[in-house]
């Protein structure tokens, strides 16, 4: 038996063992569910415990994730200055930053970044 197949089998068995062990140990009883449920002075609550979010928070999160991923793509470009042609790399980074700034301007122009509507 090859060592790679032996390692694969070992990893599969180990992960299966950990999964079933956590499933067995994490059994919740009815009393545990009652302890973590919300209540008001011993009575069932009249309102929901969750407060609804506005869609604006999700929009800000999506914008942040998009710009965060683009910045993480920009950082390795700095290291390639020493490997590639300086002029080509400068043009590539400049065009990339212009696209980022255009996206930021578009979000600002459509008032997606303002907190008050």
Image (cartoon, rainbow, N blue to C red):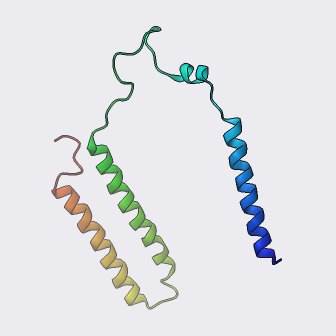
Q: Is residue 109 left or right of residue 19?
A: left
Q: Is residue 66 left or right of residue 108?
A: right
Q: Is residue 18 left or right of residue 82?
A: right
Q: Is residue 112 above or below residue 8?
A: above
Identify the residue at image location x=16%, y=41%: 117
Query: x, y percentage for residue 79?
Result: 51, 78
Q: Is residue 24 left or right of residue 60?
A: right
Q: Is residue 32 above or below residue 113?
A: above
The residue at the far right in this view is 1
The tally of labels here is: 0
Q: Specify the quadrant that holds the N terminus.
A: bottom right
Q: Is residue 101 above or below residue 65?
A: below
Identify the residue at image location x=37%, y=83%: 90
Q: Nearest the camera: 1 or 40?
A: 1
Q: Is residue 4 above or below residue 61?
A: below
Identify the residue at image location x=73%, y=68%: 8
The residue at the far bottom in this view is 85
Q: Nearest the camera: 50 or 115?
A: 50
Query: x, y percentage for residue 25?
Result: 71, 36
Residue 29 lies in quadrant: top right
Residue 35 lies in quadrant: top right
Identify the residue at image location x=40%, y=85%: 89
Query: x, y percentage for residue 109?
Result: 16, 57
């Amino acid at each position: 038996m090859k060592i790679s197949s032996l390692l694969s089998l070992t990893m599969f068995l180990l992960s299966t063992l950990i999964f079933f062990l956590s499933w067995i140990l994490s059994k919740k009883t009815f009393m545990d569910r009652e302890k973590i449920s919300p209540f008001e002075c011993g009575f069932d609550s009249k309102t929901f415990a969750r407060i609804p979010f506005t869609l604006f928070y999700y929009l800000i999160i999506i914008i942040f994730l998009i710009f965060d991923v683009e910045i993480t793509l920009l950082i390795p470009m700095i290291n390639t200055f020493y490997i590639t042609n300086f002029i080509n790399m400068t043009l590539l980074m400049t065009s990339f930053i212009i696209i980022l700034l255009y996206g930021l301007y578009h979000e600002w122009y459509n008032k997606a970044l303002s907190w008050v509507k």
